[in-house]
Image (cartoon, rainbow, N blue to C red):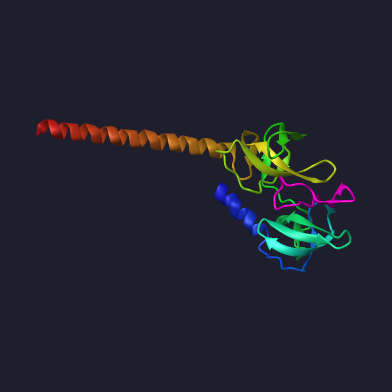
Amino acid sequence: MNLLLSIFVSLISLVSFTPEQEVKIIASSCYLYSESSFSSEYVTYQDQPVILKNGDMVEIVADEGQFVKVKIASKVVEGYVYRYYISATNAQDVYPTFNATLRTNSNLYSFDLGQVLTSLEEGTRLFLYDGYDDKQEFIPVTVVLEDGTLANGLVATSDIKPDGISSLLIVGITIIAACVTVLLSLIFIKKYKHNKKTKNKI
């Protein structure tokens, strides 16, 4: 499942960005980061965080993978934007494209788990931008807040239901796994008894 979601993320935007190219913000609203990480500090202008709105135009400085360095000429500032928050083709109007749902009321935590950023209600749609891994206790997500801005943080894995995984499918997989385990055990026991009988005859 983690692999499938990773492939899904990579297919959202196959375009690469080039320096001096003008692109449009397709996020409802997002921050400009000082480094290529959601956990880095916000870029500020006149002591206020720079917030980019849907439809704003920015210029590419460098394409650095998951994040793209951009500059805003009017404010003479540079910073990083998550690559899927910008578009050069206008093929997508508003981001994000969701791929999971909150199965119960939960919290959105800061990336160091030191702060509750906001409370989230059951049924909230999420975007799992690093894929889904049920072995992790928390998963990084993007959510749209009531005011339309995007927020990034961690949500408990147990509270998340990725799209395409139904409870019936999970039960079915569990039953199949249990049956296979029982079958292999029976085969092993039968083989063990057969080998034991063979040795006794000798």
* Depth order, front residue of 94/116: 116
Q: Quadrant of residue 169?
A: top right
For residue 50, above or below residue 123: below
- The location of residue 123, given as percent across then percent down, is 72, 37
Q: Please tell me whether residue 38 belongs to the stretch shown in magenta.
A: yes
Q: Is residue 80 visible?
A: yes
Q: Quadrant of residue 86?
A: bottom right
Q: Is residue 120 visible?
A: no
Magenta segment, principal secondary structure? Answer: loop
* Depth order, front residue of 176/107: 107
Q: Which residues are magenta?
A: 29-51
Residue at figure coordinates x 62%, y 54% from the top left: 8
* Depth order, front residue of 147/83: 83
**Apparent side of residue 89 relative to residue 185 in the rendered image (left or right):** right
For residue 163, above or below residue 197: below
- Number of marks in the rendered image: 0
Q: Please tell me whether residue 122 belongs to the stretch shown in magenta.
A: no
Residue at figure coordinates x 84%, y 58% from the top left: 55
**Apparent side of residue 150 relative to residue 133 in the rendered image (left or right):** right
* Depth order, front residue of 109/50: 50
Residue at figure coordinates x 18%, y 32% from the top left: 196
Residue at figure coordinates x 70%, y 49% from the top left: 37
**Apparent side of residue 136 relative to residue 59 in the rendered image (left or right):** left
- The location of residue 69, given as percent across then percent down, is 74, 59
- The location of residue 97, given as percent across then percent down, is 71, 51
Taking the view exactly as shown, the residue that stands out farthest to the front is 47
For residue 78, above or below residue 157: below
Quadrant where the C terminus is found in the figure = top left
- The location of residue 7, given as percent across then percent down, is 59, 55
